[in-house]
């Protein structure tokens, strides 16, 4: 009889523990990802990026609408050469030299008059002229 009471007590304790743990379960709630269906609006950029990554459609008119044409090799070389010559001219001014550079678009005159640097830029197409004057330069530095 003692064993039956022990088993009954153990059975009641186990069934109580199992019943108590089942009552702690929570309900699963679906949360949508797409902001169009009630999800977080912060997911919008991620969803747009994912959609654009999957889009393999190329608009044939998009190239003609941009208006950009790549420069030819000769134009790139000419631009790089002009940039290099202007850089050399400006570095020669640091040594106390003056000079000028004429391109298709501009005329650049640089005059260093004992610490007063004057740069005159003339637009050859419009005739507009701009002048930059810098005072207090020390040519010995």
Image (cartoon, grey):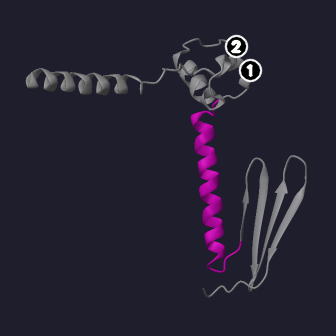
Instruction: Decide if residue 6 is on the left or right side of residue 16.
Output: left
Quadrant for the N terminus, please: top left
Q: Which one is in front, 43 or 52?
A: 43
Q: Give the Cα distance between marks 1 and 2.
A: 6 Å
For the point 9% across and 25% down, the residue is 2
Quadrant for the C terminus, please: bottom right
Pointer 1 with pointer 2, Cβ within 8 A = yes
* Residue 93 percent location from the top left of the image: 66, 74
Q: Which one is in front, 59 or 84?
A: 59
For residue 132, above or below residue 50: below
* Residue 132 percent location from the top left of the image: 82, 69
- When asked about the image quadrant of residue 121, the answer is bottom right
- When asked about the image quadrant of residue 55, the answer is top right
Q: Which one is in front, 60 or 4?
A: 4
* Residue 85 percent location from the top left of the image: 62, 59
Q: Which residues are magenta?
A: 70-98
For residue 74, above or below residue 50: below
**Residue farthest along the front direction in this orientation:** 1
Instruction: Decide if residue 102 is on the left or right side of residue 124.
Output: left
Prevailing secondary structure of the magenta residues: helix
- When asked about the image quadrant of residue 134, the answer is bottom right
The residue where tag 2 is placed is 61
The residue where tag 1 is placed is 65
Q: Which one is in front, 56 or 60?
A: 56
For residue 118, above or below residue 27: below
* Residue 92 percent location from the top left of the image: 62, 72
For the point 63% across and 39% down, the residue is 75
């Amino acid at each position: 009889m003692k064993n039956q009471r022990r088993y009954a007590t153990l059975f009641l304790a186990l069934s109580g523990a199992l019943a108590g743990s089942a009552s702690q379960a929570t309900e699963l709630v679906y949360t949508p990802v797409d902001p169009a269906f009630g999800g977080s609006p912060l997911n919008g950029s991620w969803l747009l990026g994912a959609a654009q990554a999957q889009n393999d459609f190329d608009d044939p008119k998009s190239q003609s609408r941009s208006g950009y044409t790549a420069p030819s090799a000769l134009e790139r070389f000419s631009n790089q050469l002009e940039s290099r010559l202007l850089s050399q001219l400006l570095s020669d001014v640091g040594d106390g030299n003056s000079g000028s550079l004429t391109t298709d678009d501009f005329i650049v005159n640089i005059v260093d008059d004992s610490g007063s640097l004057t740069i005159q830029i003339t637009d050859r197409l419009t005739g507009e002229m701009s002048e930059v004057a810098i005072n207090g330069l020390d040519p010995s530095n």
